[in-house]
Structure formats: structure tokens, C-alpha cells
Image (cartoon, rainbow, N blue to C red):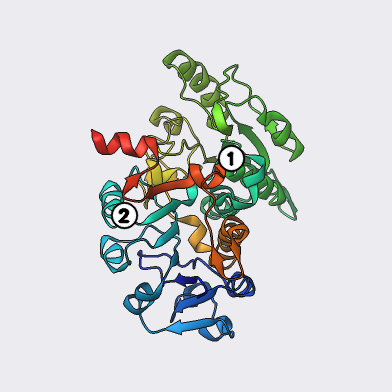
């Protein structure tokens, strides 16, 4: 009997993505799998129900019916506790799970012996780049956050020569040069802004400058393990802050993208820095979901602080549901397809990618940091 892969409708408020687009659903069926789609699952991402129809795909009326038949469940957002109750014992779940924020969810997955993979735990190794959900969704977010900054700004981003005179281009400072930051740099440059960027990893300089931006050098390095940045010491933070404050004061827009997976976002832009900015300037905080890089950020809100707009948008990839869904679905396909042959799924637990992205298995919590949180 072929493995049955199920795609429910996302139930999180405001979520418009779907875990499998029609193309990747069809590719799974070509591997011999049967794909089950809850009716309406792709509508918010502009994928009609009939786009999923194939000889090996089925549309089901509701999530309860879907989960009752599923061997593998694909989701974008973490399932609710109610959804977990609908899962059959031993089901395989692939989703963004954010275990450090959802300990009760982890307990329920453990109790029901669900084999769960947190897609954000995919190790950042060369072989797994095509499976990296964080990178694919950050690329979407970085593009959109630059557009948000331009939209909220009190002036133009590009230089304009008009009958009334020449308008100088906006100065944009981008904090963090990971995937999202680099995409924000590229987009702000395309919009015509003068862009400066800061990252505590010296290796980011080449990438920043290759996109036409100028690297802000604070003299602080915090290269961490696995491609992430480490936490700074108090002295390093002060040195960083003094240099950044001067650049931020001259900026028309500041975009912050610095995040540490599984932890609160580092506070980089202080209240004093914002108060040193010119009226009409804007701060857009891409790290709002994990607390924000700016001390004034209110997640999900846009506020005015002494004439400076501070925005903390949430779930930005969902605002571009078509490319975000397509990229996410391709990540899932690249992750799972090597282990599907003639419709049968065999997980290779000796594979580093499989082992390190597993959250729960056989009633145990596999992810050590999450296990420690549960033991506290």
C-alpha cells in the first residue's frame, strides 16, 4: 500500500501558505505516494482544489477525515493541540514546530508517539541547503521587508531629478546579513537607496559589498557555530551600539533581521538610537516574532515614537503566499523524496539531516535543547 501524504488547511490566523503546491504534490505521486488534500487547503495561496487533481491525489472534505487516513502530514505552522488529537499514533509530521515556544505541543506529540520533524532544525550543511526552510522563507521575508520600509518611509528611496529639483536618495541601514538581510539589501538597492549593512560576522563583508552596499565596521566579531552568530558580551554590545548609533541617526530607514534560532532576538537598536533618528524615519523589525531587535518593537504593531515609525510585522512570508508556498514545498520534497521508493517510505535514521531535524520519535524527545526545557 502506498504511503499516504496529507496536506491539511492551515488554521493559524492569517496564515495563507500551504505546505504542498500542486507541482510538488504531483512529484510525490510520481514516486508512488498517494497525496491527500483537504478541500480549500491551497485557496489562500491561490491554488484551486482542481489544480491538485491527479490519479494519485484525493480531495477530502475535512481535517478529521484527512488525519484519519494520513501516514505523513505536511504543515506550515505548528499543529494545534486539537489537530494533534486527530493524528493517528505513529503518524509522521513535518512542519515548522518552534518547540521552545510550544512545549505543550511537544508533550502531546511525545505522548501520541508521533514521529515529528521540525523543519527549522534542518542542519545548515551544504547537502541540506535545498531543504533549508529557514533560508527559503527568509528570502521571501527579506524582499518584502524592504518594500515595507519603502512604503512606510516619509520619502522616496531612489534619487529623483524633477522640475522642482533633485531629490537625494534615502539612506538605509540593514542590521543582519543572513539570507533575509542580504535579500533586503538587494531589494533596497534595486529601489535606488544608498545602503549600509552591519553583521557581527566578518565573513559577511564580501556578500554585503557584492550587492553594492557598504559594510559598517564596529570592530566587533561574533562568528558562531553552524553559520549563526553568538551572543555578544556587554563590552562588545556597547562598542557595537556606539558605532551603529551614528549610522542609524543618519538613516531614513533601518531594517533589522538579526535572529538566533530558539532564543529571543538580540536587542540591537535601543530607544536612544531611535530617538536620535530624524522625524519621518522608519524602523522595520523583521525579528519581531522572537521579541524584536529594537527595544521599542511591539510585535504585530506599527507605532510612532517621537516622529519615527517602528513596525514589527509578523509572519511576513505569508503575505507572499505563492512563492513562499512553492519554496517551502520544494524544501519538503527535497527532504523526504530520497527516502520514498515505489510508494514506500523508509526513514534513514543514520542520515545526519534526518537525525538532527527529528523532534519526537517513539515517545521520546530527540532534540536535546527541547528535552532540557521540558525537564526544568
- Which quadrant does the C terminus fall into? top left
* Residue 365 drawn at (x, y percent): 34, 44
Q: What percent of the width, then of the height, locates residue 207?
A: 71, 35
Q: Residue at x 50, y 75 (%)?
A: 1
Q: Residue at x 42, y 16 (%)?
A: 234
Q: Quadrant of residue 77?
A: bottom left
The tag on residue 109 is 2
**As displayed, is residue 325 above or below residue 55?**
above
Q: Secondary structure at mark 1?
A: loop
- Dot 2 falls on a residue whose secondary structure is helix
Residue at the far front: name it: 1
Q: Which residue is mark 1?
A: 124
Sequence-earlier tag: 2 or 1: 2
Q: How dense is the environment of label 1, judged by Cα within 10 Å: few (below 14), some, or many (20 and up)?
A: some
On the image, the x and y values in percent for residue 30 come to: 64, 74
Q: Is residue 311 visible?
A: no
Image location (x, y in percent) of residue 65:
34, 79
Question: Residue visible at 51% across and 47% down?
Answer: 349
Amino acid at each position: 500500500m502506498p504511503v499516504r501524504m496529507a496536506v491539511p488547511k492551515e488554521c493559524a490566523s492569517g496564515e495563507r501558505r500551504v505546505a504542498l503546491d500542486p507541482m510538488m504534490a504531483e512529484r510525490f505521486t510520481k514516486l508512488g505516494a498517494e497525496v491527500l488534500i483537504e478541500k480549500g487547503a491551497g485557496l489562500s495561496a491561490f491554488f484551486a482544489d482542481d489544480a491538485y487533481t491527479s490519479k494519485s491525489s484525493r480531495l477530502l472534505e475535512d481535517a478529521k477525515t484527512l488525519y484519519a487516513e494520513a501516514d505523513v502530514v505536511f504543515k506550515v505552522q505548528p499543529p494545534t493541540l486539537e489537530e494533534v488529537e486527530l493524528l493517528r499514533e505513529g503518524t509522521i509530521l513535518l512542519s515548522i514546530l518552534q518547540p521552545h515556544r510550544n512545549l505543550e505541543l511537544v508533550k502531546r506529540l511525545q505522548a501520541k508517539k508521533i514521529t515529528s520533524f521540525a523543519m527549522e532544525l534542518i542542519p545548515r550543511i551544504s547537502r541540506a541547503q535545498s531543504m533549508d526552510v529557514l533560508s527559503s522563507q527568509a528570502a521571501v521575508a527579506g524582499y518584502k521587508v524592504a518594500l515595507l520600509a519603502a512604503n512606510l518611509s516619509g520619502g522616496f528611496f531612489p534619487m529623483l531629478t524633477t522640475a522642482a529639483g533633485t531629490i537625494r536618495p534615502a539612506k538605509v541601514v540593514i542590521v543582519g546579513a543572513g539570507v533575509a538581510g542580504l535579500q533586503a539589501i538587494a531589494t533596497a538597492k534595486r529601489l535606488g537607496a544608498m545602503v549600509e549593512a552591519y553583521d557581527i560576522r566578518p565573513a559577511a563583508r564580501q556578500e554585503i559589498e557584492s550587492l553594492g552596499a557598504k559594510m559598517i565596521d564596529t570592530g566587533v566579531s561574533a562568528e558562531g557555530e553552524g553559520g549563526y552568530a553568538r551572543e555578544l558580551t556587554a563590552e562588545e554590545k556597547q562598542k557595537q551600539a556606539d558605532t551603529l548609533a551614528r549610522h542609524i541617526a543618519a538613516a531614513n530607514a533601518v531594517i533589522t533581521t538579526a535572529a538566533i534560532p530558539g532564543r529571543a532576538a538580540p536587542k540591537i537598536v535601543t530607544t536612544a538610537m531611535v530617538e536620535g533618528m530624524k522625524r519621518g524615519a522608519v524602523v522595520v523589525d523583521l525579528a519581531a516574532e522572537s521579541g524584536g531587535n529594537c527595544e521599542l518593537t511591539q510585535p504585530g504593531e506599527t507605532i510612532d515614537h517621537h516622529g519615527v515609525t517602528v513596525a514589527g510585522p509578523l509572519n511576513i512570508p505569508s503575505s507572499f503566499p505563492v512563492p513562499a508556498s512553492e519554496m517551502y514545498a520544494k524544501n519538503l520534497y527535497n527532504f523526504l523524496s530520497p527516502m520514498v521508493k515505489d510508494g514506500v517510505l523508509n526513514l534513514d535514521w543514520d542520515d545526519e539531516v534526518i537525525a538532527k531535524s527529528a523532534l519526537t520519535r517513539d515517545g521520546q524527545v530527540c532534540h536535546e535543547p527541547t528535552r532540557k526545557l521540558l525537564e526544568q
